[in-house]
């Protein structure tokens, strides 16, 4: 489904730099989930956002959901090689939905 | 430890053969899912199940079959009718979502299927 767009598709940053990944939906979100994946491995849950304007942080990663609930950003502060991987956003579009629609992912490379 | 176990990690299949991917969870989750991941296409839902003995087709169910005889298990069979089965397959599970709370979907480590 192209209802969920992620940008950029890939990102290469120097260690210590900040970066932002965006996830934009063509429809209003009920919930927005961020996951991280190492290539060829499972997805690791990072954060879930449900309320417009909501912001959550975990260590050096901060995710925000805009007021209209159609866009989310994932911000990494002072990136480290351990942050490298594929970041995917997943969207729930209705109350009680038990399935997520995923973006195509952003591949992050952090150069030491 | 609680989690989702997929097996095998790597599987090779000859054209025309059916293969079954195993998925077991001990998280006591009601819902289970199968996703397929191809390069540049993100994850696409194949099948999901919210309760034992019941399951629903996802976006790309053709050529696949599932069963849910036990709460803990949700095996996926890739049949010979699936025209392009080479992919990375991810099993997942979650509690059921409600009107007031979303559900977090947790994933297994995935299985690579290659048709030779």
Image: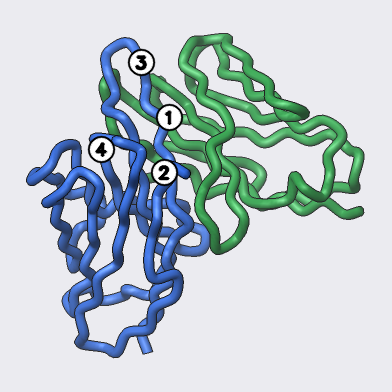
Residue placed under numbered mark 1 in the picture:
A26
Residue placed under numbered mark 4 in the picture:
B31
Q: Specify whether A59 is left or right of B8.
A: right
Instruction: State yes or no: discs 2 and 1 in contact (Cβ < 8 Å).
Output: yes
Name the disc covering residue A89, or none.
none
The letter of the green chain is A
Asked if marks 2 and 4 fall on the same chain, the answer is no
Q: Mark 4 to mark 1: distance in Å?
A: 26 Å
**A46 over B52 or under it: above or below:** above
Instruction: State yes or no: discs 2 and 3 in contact (Cβ < 8 Å).
Output: no
Q: What's the chain of the residue with tag 1? A: A
User: What kind of colouring is applied to the model shown?
Assistant: by chain
Q: Nearer the viewer, residue A100 or B100?
A: B100
Q: What's the chain of the residue with tag 2? A: A
Q: Specify whether B63 is left or right of A95.
A: left
Q: Mark 2 to mark 4: distance in Å?
A: 25 Å
Residue placed under numbered mark 3 in the picture:
B101
Q: What's the chain of the residue with tag 4? A: B
Instruction: State yes or no: discs 1 and 3 in contact (Cβ < 8 Å).
Output: no
Asked if marks 2 and 1 fall on the same chain, the answer is yes
- Of the two numbered discs 3 and 4 on the same chain, state the one appearing first in sequence: 4
The letter of the blue chain is B
The furthest residue to the front = B1
């Amino acid at each position: 489904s192209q209802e969920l767009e992620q940008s950029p598709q890939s990102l290469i940053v120097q260690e210590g730099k900040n970066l932002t990944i965006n996830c934009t939906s063509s429809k209003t979100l009920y919930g927005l989930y961020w996951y991280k994946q190492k290539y060829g491995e499972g997805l690791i849950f990072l954060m879930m956002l449900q309320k417009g304007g909501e912001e959550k942080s975990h260590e050096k990663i901060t995710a925000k959901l805009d007021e209209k609930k159609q866009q989310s950003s994932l911000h990494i502060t002072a990136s480290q090689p351990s942050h490298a991987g594929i970041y995917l956003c997943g969207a729930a579009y209705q109350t009680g939905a038990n399935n997520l629609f995923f973006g195509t992912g952003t591949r992050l490379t952090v150069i030491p | 430890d609680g989690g989702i176990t997929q097996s095998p990690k790597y599987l090779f299949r000859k054209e025309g053969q059916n293969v079954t991917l195993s998925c077991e969870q001990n998280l006591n989750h009601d819902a289970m899912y199968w996703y397929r991941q191809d390069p540049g296409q993100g994850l696409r839902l194949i099948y999901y199940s919210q309760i034992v003995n019941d399951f629903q087709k996802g976006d790309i169910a053709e050529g696949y079959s599932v069963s849910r005889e036990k709460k803990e298990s949700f095996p996926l069979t890739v049949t010979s009718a699936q025209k392009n089965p080479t992919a990375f397959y991810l099993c997942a599970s979650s509690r059921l979502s409600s009107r007031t709370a979303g559900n977090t979907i947790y994933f297994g480590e995935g299985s690579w299927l290659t048709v030779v």
